[in-house]
């Protein structure tokens, strides 16, 4: 069968909604993707090696907690309708006409090179069941050249099929952020990196069933560079905001007033500084972008930005020590610290690369006792006032809505040393003055 004919047949199946869809990886990307295409009328099979996650989905329960508008209701709806079913083994994957891969792609802590254990395992399973005429889409964020050097050869080797002759290959990197998953998938423009003109046309036909944003077709390498570069750019912009914050602290200025006035100019957009950068993408996509660059020493801005962002939880710990000493503490060993927020993002349960984890490790290594509260992370849920009770100081690490609504006068009353460190501008300097506490905050001079 010619590539053109395969494309015509698959586009017709997509248009008729008779194409079967497989989603490999049911995390923060895979779950909403599977649910949306199931809602659009496709028969969707989701695959994940974590059996508890599979069981939840098959009960109509979203495995993603936090404030995720519409997702829980949508998962329940499509499971009850019978258009979404989850599996922990891959026997039925060979029935799929479109396979989407959205598994984690971490980097090694020491070498800063990608670790593709999950990706290669998924590709081997797909290859073992791959049928001719299938469209394979990699949505996972990957280092530039990975499609050519890892994905294509592994699929061909395990399947015995050939790209362009037997299957289509596309890299359409996700652009998601927890808290807006469904909205972003439906409305954002997408970059469709295609291995051939026919692959691009089939992928555009598929994505247009759900995505209302523009679908820009390009080559595989450009799509890889676009995704890793756009995340790296955002991390650099955050690093600039973090460095401005440190400068403001030193000068005695307030970075939040400075940011507000900078952003009055319509062509400026200073991002928010904070106690650290987390999530699956921003802390590592620097490294993915440069993984296959021959001379990585030339990427000086990227390396510097990564260093600035990585040190923010440590800087937050230093603010805590300064606050305690200002409040009269001579030896901070043994002090009890309540850390508010453990996810990496407000109103989310996502703890991947959490800055709070770094902070807790630092504080414990310095001799502090640490207790943690987070309304969205199962391990740390509970009454926040009970968590804070008996603590000497509070460190606010995540701007959850719940923390803005706390009775901060009650928090101040039960703190032994009356010290509050604000890593996300939740309380604010003026409110802290009214409480009579020792206040230290990212970007706020004393």
Image (cartoon, rainbow, N blue to C red):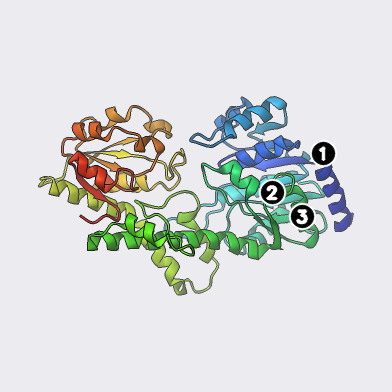
Q: Residues within 10 Å of mark 2 (few under 14, many from 20)?
A: some
Disc 2 secondary structure class? loop
- 163 to 29, vertically: above or below: below
Disc 3 secondary structure class? strand
Q: Which mark is residue 212?
A: 2
Find disc 3 in the rendering and name its residue.
Answer: 168
Taking 172 as reference, is 240 left or right?
left
Name the quarter where the N terminus is drawn.
bottom right
Task: Evaluate if marks 2 and 3 touch, with contact meaning CB atoms under 8 Å apart.
Answer: no
Q: Nearer the viewer, residue 208 or 83?
A: 208
Q: Nearer the viewer, residue 266 or 443?
A: 266
**Of callouts 2 and 3, the N-terminal one:** 3
Q: Tell me where residue 422 appears, x and y as whole percent.
A: 29, 46
Q: Which mark is residue 225?
A: none
What is the spatial separation of the Cα atoms under label 2 and label 3, in whole angstroms? 23 Å
Q: Which mark is residue 18?
A: 1
Name the quarter where the C terminus is drawn.
bottom left
**Of callouts 3 and 1, the N-terminal one:** 1
Q: Residues within 10 Å of mark 1 (few under 14, many from 20)?
A: some
């Amino acid at each position: 069968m010619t590539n053109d004919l395969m494309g015509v047949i698959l586009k017709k199946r997509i248009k008729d909604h008779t194409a079967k869809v497989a989603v490999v990886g049911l995390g923060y990307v895979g779950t909403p993707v599977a649910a949306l295409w199931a809602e659009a009328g496709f028969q969707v099979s989701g695959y994940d090696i974590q059996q508890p996650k599979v069981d939840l989905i098959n009960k109509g329960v979203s495995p993603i907690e936090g404030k995720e508008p519409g997702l829980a209701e949508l998962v329940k709806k499509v499971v009850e309708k019978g258009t979404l079913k989850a599996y922990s083994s891959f026997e039925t994957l060979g029935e799929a006409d479109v396979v989407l891969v959205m598994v984690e792609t971490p980097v090694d802590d020491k070498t800063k090179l990608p670790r593709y254990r999950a990706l290669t395992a998924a590709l081997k399973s797909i290859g073992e069941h791959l049928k001719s005429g299938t469209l394979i889409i990699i949505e996972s964020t990957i280092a530039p050249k990975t499609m050519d050097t890892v994905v294509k050869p592994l699929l061909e080797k395990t399947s015995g099929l050939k790209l362009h002759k037997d299957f289509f290959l596309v890299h359409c990197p996700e652009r998601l952020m927890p808290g807006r998953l469904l909205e972003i998938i439906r409305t954002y423009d997408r970059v469709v990196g295609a291995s051939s003109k026919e692959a691009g046309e089939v992928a555009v036909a598929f994505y247009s069933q759900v995505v209302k944003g523009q679908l820009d077709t390009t080559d595989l390498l450009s799509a890889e560079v676009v995704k890793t570069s756009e995340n790296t750019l955002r991390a650099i912009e955050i690093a600039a905001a973090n460095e401005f914050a440190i400068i403001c602290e030193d000068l005695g200025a307030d970075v939040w007033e400075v940011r507000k006035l900078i952003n009055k100019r319509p062509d400026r957009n200073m991002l928010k500084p904070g106690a650290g950068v987390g999530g699956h993408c921003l802390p590592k996509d620097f490294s993915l972008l440069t993984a296959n660059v021959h001379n990585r020493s030339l990427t000086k801005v990227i390396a510097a930005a990564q260093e600035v962002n990585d040190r923010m939880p440590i800087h937050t710990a230093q603010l805590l020590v300064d606050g305690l000493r200002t409040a009269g503490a001579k030896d901070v060993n043994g002090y009890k610290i309540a850390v508010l927020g453990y996810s990496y993002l407000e109103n989310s349960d996502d703890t991947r690369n959490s800055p709070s984890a770094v902070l807790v490790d630092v504080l414990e290594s310095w001799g502090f006792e640490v207790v943690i509260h987070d309304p969205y992370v199962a391990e740390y849920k509970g009454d926040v006032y009970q968590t804070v009770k008996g603590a000497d100081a509070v460190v606010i690490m995540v701007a959850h809505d719940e923390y803005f609504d706390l009775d901060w006068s009650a928090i101040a009353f039960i703190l032994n040393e009356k010290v509050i460190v604000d890593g996300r501008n939740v309380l604010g300097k003026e409110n802290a003055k009214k409480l009579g506490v020792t206040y230290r905050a990212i970007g706020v001079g004393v």
